[in-house]
Image (cartoon, rainbow, N blue to C red):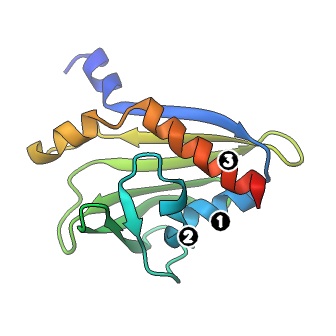
C-alpha cells in the first residue's frame, strides 16, 4: 500500500471551540449525548448511564440503520483523549477507529481534533461506508459539538 492510499484511510478535522475541555469531553464521553452532535447522521441512540471512564470500557450504541454496535475504548485520558473501535455485538472489531483529542487553548477555549481511522479495516462490506466518512462530515460533528458546548 502506498503512503497516499494509507493517508486517505485516516481523515480528521480540527476546530477551536469556545468552551472548556471538561465540558466538551462530557458530551463526547457520554454515549447518550453522541447522537446530538453526530455529523455523520449515523447514531440513533444509546442507553443512558454508559459514560466512559476508563480504558477498556465498552459502550453500546444503536445506529440509524437499527444495528447495535459495541464500542471498545482503546485510548482514554479523562478530559483529553477518547478513542473507540466499533464492533458487532460479540464479534471482533473490524479495524476502524474513532478518536477525539482535546487540547486547552486558553481559559475557556479548546482545540478539538476528530479523527476517523480505517487503515486497518478488513471487512469489505464496510469499505464504501468508510470511504464516505470525509473530513467534512467530521467537521460537521465538530460544528454541532461546538454549538452544544458553547450554548449550554
54, above or below 105, in the image: below
Q: CA distance from mark 1 to mark 2?
A: 6 Å
Residue at 29 percent across and 25 percent down: it is: 6
Q: Is residue 123 left or right of residue 99?
A: left
Residue at 42 percent across and 49 percent down: it is: 98
User: Which quadrant would residue 149 be assigned to in this image?
Assistant: bottom right
Crowding at dot 1, Cα within 10 Å, few <14 / some 14-19 / many 20+, comes out as: some
Residue picked out by circle 1: 26
Quadrant containing the N terminus in the rendered view: top left
Q: Nearer the viewer, residue 54 or 149?
A: 149
Crowding at dot 2, Cα within 10 Å, few <14 / some 14-19 / many 20+, comes out as: some
Residue picked out by circle 2: 30
Crowding at dot 3, Cα within 10 Å, few <14 / some 14-19 / many 20+, comes out as: many
Is label 3 in a helix, a strand or a loop?
A: helix
User: Which of marks 3 and 1 precedes in the sequence?
Assistant: 1
User: Which quadrant would residue 134 be assigned to in this image?
Assistant: top left
Location of residue 64 in the rendering, given as x and y in whole percent from the top left corner? 31, 61
Q: How many marks?
A: 3
Q: CA distance from mark 1 to mark 3?
A: 13 Å
Is label 2 in a helix, a strand or a loop?
A: loop
Decide if residue 78 is in sight here: no
Which disc is residue 97 wearing? none
Q: Nearer the viewer, residue 105 or 16?
A: 16
Which disc is residue 146 wearing? 3
Location of residue 107 in the rendering, given as x and y in whole percent from the top left corner? 89, 47
Location of residue 148 in the rendering, given as x and y in whole percent from the top left corner? 67, 56
Amino acid at each position: 500500500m502506498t503512503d497516499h492510499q494509507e493517508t486517505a484511510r485516516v481523515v480528521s478535522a480540527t476546530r477551536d471551540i469556545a468552551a472548556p475541555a471538561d465540558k466538551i469531553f462530557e458530551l463526547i464521553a457520554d454515549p447518550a449525548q453522541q447522537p446530538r452532535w453526530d455529523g455523520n447522521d449515523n447514531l440513533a441512540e444509546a442507553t443512558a448511564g454508559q459514560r466512559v471512564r476508563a480504558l477498556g470500557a465498552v459502550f453500546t450504541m444503536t445506529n440509524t440503520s437499527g444495528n447495535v454496535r459495541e464500542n471498545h475504548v482503546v485510548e482514554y485520558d479523562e478530559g483529553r483523549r477518547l478513542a473507540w473501535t466499533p464492533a458487532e455485538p460479540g464479534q471482533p472489531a473490524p479495524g476502524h477507529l474513532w478518536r477525539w483529542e482535546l487540547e486547552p487553548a486558553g481559559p475557556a477555549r479548546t482545540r478539538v481534533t476528530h479523527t476517523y481511522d480505517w487503515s486497518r479495516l478488513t471487512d469489505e462490506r464496510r469499505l464504501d461506508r468508510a470511504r464516505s466518512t470525509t473530513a467534512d462530515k467530521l467537521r460537521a460533528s465538530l460544528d454541532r459539538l461546538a454549538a452544544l458546548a458553547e450554548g449550554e
